Image (cartoon, rainbow, N blue to C red):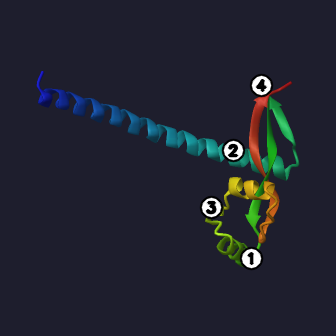
């Protein structure tokens, strides 16, 4: 077999595989959008109606609290980041892992506070 023939075969295989992946990604994106809408509705309803969770089909779906750091005073926080060369605290949102690591090392980071946010949990019922 010539190199050209091998390349042509590989190119056809790559194109076919890529088309399959892209088609599946489109389907997955639509499924994820639907999942997100259901999740948002469930989380809002559980919170508004003060329902801790529900057992459905032998599985518990509930709001799971999670402590996260949020910037309370942007100027104070930015000053700290600059003084301490702590750019790793930034991401699209405040970097939870970087905050946790610094706080565990005893560093008090000015300009942030901890708040509780909720995720939707789904697990087997006891």
Q: Callout 3: helix, strand or loop?
A: helix
**Which tag, 1 or 3, sits closer to the chain's start?**
1
Q: Are marks 3 and 2 in contact (CB under 8 Å)?
A: no
- How many numbered discs sit on the rendered protein? 4
Label 3 Cα crowd, 10 Å radius (few <14 / some 14-19 / many 20+):
few
* 87 lies above or below 4: below
> Quick one: quadrant of the N terminus?
top left
Q: Which mark is residue 39?
A: 2
Label 2 Cα crowd, 10 Å radius (few <14 / some 14-19 / many 20+):
some
- From the viewer's perspective, is the residue at label 3 or at label 2 nearer? 3
- Which of 65/46 is in front? 65
Quote the CA–CA distance across marks 4 and 2. Answer: 17 Å
Reading the image, the residue beneath label 3 is 88
Q: Callout 1: helix, strand or loop?
A: helix
* 124 lies above or below 46: above
Quote the CA–CA distance across marks 1 and 4. Answer: 49 Å
Label 4 Cα crowd, 10 Å radius (few <14 / some 14-19 / many 20+):
few
Q: In the rendering, at what x and y percent does residue 105 appear?
A: 79, 56
- From the viewer's perspective, is the residue at label 1 or at label 2 nearer? 1
Q: Are marks 4 and 2 in contact (CB under 8 Å)?
A: no
Q: Are marks 1 and 4 in contact (CB under 8 Å)?
A: no
Q: Callout 2: helix, strand or loop?
A: helix
Q: In the rendering, at what x and y percent does residue 47 appear?
A: 83, 50
Q: Which mark is residue 57?
A: 4
**Which tag, 1 or 2, sits closer to the chain's start?**
2
On the image, which quarter does residue 86 sit in?
Answer: bottom right
Reading the image, the residue beneath label 1 is 76
Q: Is residue 40 visible?
A: yes
Quote the CA–CA distance across marks 1 and 2. Answer: 35 Å
Quote the CA–CA distance across marks 1 and 3. Answer: 16 Å
Q: Is residue 96 left or right of residue 66?
A: left
């Amino acid at each position: 077999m010539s190199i050209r023939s091998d390349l042509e075969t590989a190119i056809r295989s790559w194109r076919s595989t890529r088309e399959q992946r892209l088609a599946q990604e489109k389907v997955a994106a639509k499924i994820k959008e639907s999942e997100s809408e259901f999740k948002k509705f469930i989380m809002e309803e559980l919170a508004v109606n003060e329902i801790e969770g529900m057992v459905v089909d032998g599985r518990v779906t509930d709001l799971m609290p999670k402590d996260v750091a949020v910037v309370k005073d942007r100027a104070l926080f930015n000053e700290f980041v600059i003084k301490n060369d702590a750019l790793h605290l930034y991401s699209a949102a405040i970097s939870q892992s970087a905050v946790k690591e610094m706080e565990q090392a005893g560093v008090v980071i000015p300009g942030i506070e901890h708040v509780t946010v909720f995720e939707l949990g789904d697990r087997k019922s006891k």
